[in-house]
Image: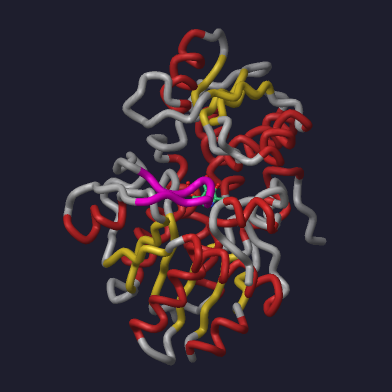
Amino acid sequence: MDIKRGFANAVGNTPLIRLNSFSDETGCEILGKAEFLNPGGSVKDRAALYIVEDAEEKGLLKPGGTVVEGTAGNTGIGLAHICNAKGYKCLIIIPETQSQEKIEMLRTLGAEVRTVPAVPYKDPNNYVKLSGRIAAEMENAIWANQFENLANRQAHYETTAAEIWSQTDGAIDGWVAATGTGGTYAGVSMFLKAKNPTIRCVVADPMGSGLYSYVKTGDIKIEGSSITEGIGNSRITGNMEGAPIDDAIQIDDREAVRVIYQLMEKDGLFMGGSVGINVGAAVALAKQMGAGHTIVTVLCDGGGRYQSKLFNRDWLASKGLSPD
Ligand SMILES: Cc1ncc(COP(=O)(O)O)c(C=O)c1O
């Protein structure tokens, strides 16, 4: 029998999918870890589960307790599912710029959701800082603190990376992923470099994020903006500290949208915006490395969470973008 013992046990062990149209175009094997198939629908289920179980093991989260988090959506959705499955309450602080689909989903799942203005990290009312203060003031509550809590990248070190290694039999030449908290990128790159230091580990970055310039010049410089959600950063988070980085690739929204529609129309994969950055960067890395290499990236979440934006021609046009 192969039975998953509840939601928590069903997280992870996702397929690694060959992205046929992009692989054929580049002569490389471009492989996407199908994180949209997690039971909460995104890569963040892994981090949410490890954060909650780490707090349980440390005795910080007690029966009837509340998990508080500032999140762009997917971590909150993962936490809300896990809280339901484990009997905790969930309080989510989310910037009001995030997609309505994600905000409504959180409310449907029973989380208390507070939307707040999107302000930079240096502002004390930034959603992340606000969530920490709110958690500190509550009885029997923990702050998930996904940006600094290293249980996040540990989830990817122990599960995502180990799965990629065994699914490819260790035959992998490149790993590329955009970062929000950095948990996925850091956990996987630390594992892969420990196994084989010649694997090229590359940060994918949208416009409006400072990591590309940080990798290239050592300074965080921000230019432009992006419609993608959940990725990009203006600082080095605790989860990114010490992560091996060989290079960075910047992908603009035009290219990300082109990639998203090609994934849908040619590969049958209906994906969220960060996947456009990831796969766009995997294609760029494939071109840099040349034919015959195997490059792995992440299919973070599905397109249904962005129906009103990424898959709405009028909305795209309002941003100067088009699927054509
Ligand atoms: C859609 C999406 N893609 C990518 C990421 C980045 O993952 P990580 O936080 O592990 O860097 C996130 C994180 O919230 C996300 O929501």
Q: Quadrant of residue 199?
A: bottom left
The answer to whether residue 208 is above or below residue 114 is below
The stretch of residues the image draws in magenta is 224-233
From the viewer's perspective, is residue 285 above or below residue 249? below
Q: Residue at x 53, y 44 (%)?
A: 47
Taking depth in this image into account, of 58 and 41 the one nearest to the observer is 41
Q: Position of residue 176 (x, y in %)?
A: 42, 66
Where in the figure is residue 197, as x and y percent of width and height? 28, 71
Residue 67 appears at what percent x and percent y? 59, 24
Front in this rendered view, residue 251 or 290: 251
Residue 226 is inside the magenta segment? yes
The reply to whether residue 194 is visible in this rendering is no
Q: Judge whether residue 43 is colored magenta.
A: no
Main SS, magenta region, reads: loop
Note whether 101 is above or below 87 in the view shown: below
Residue at 63% over, 75% down = 262
Residue 80, quarter of picture: top right
Given the current orientation, which residue lies at the most extreme left position? 218
Identity of the residue furthest to the right in this view: 1
Residue at (52%, 36%) from the top-left corner? 51
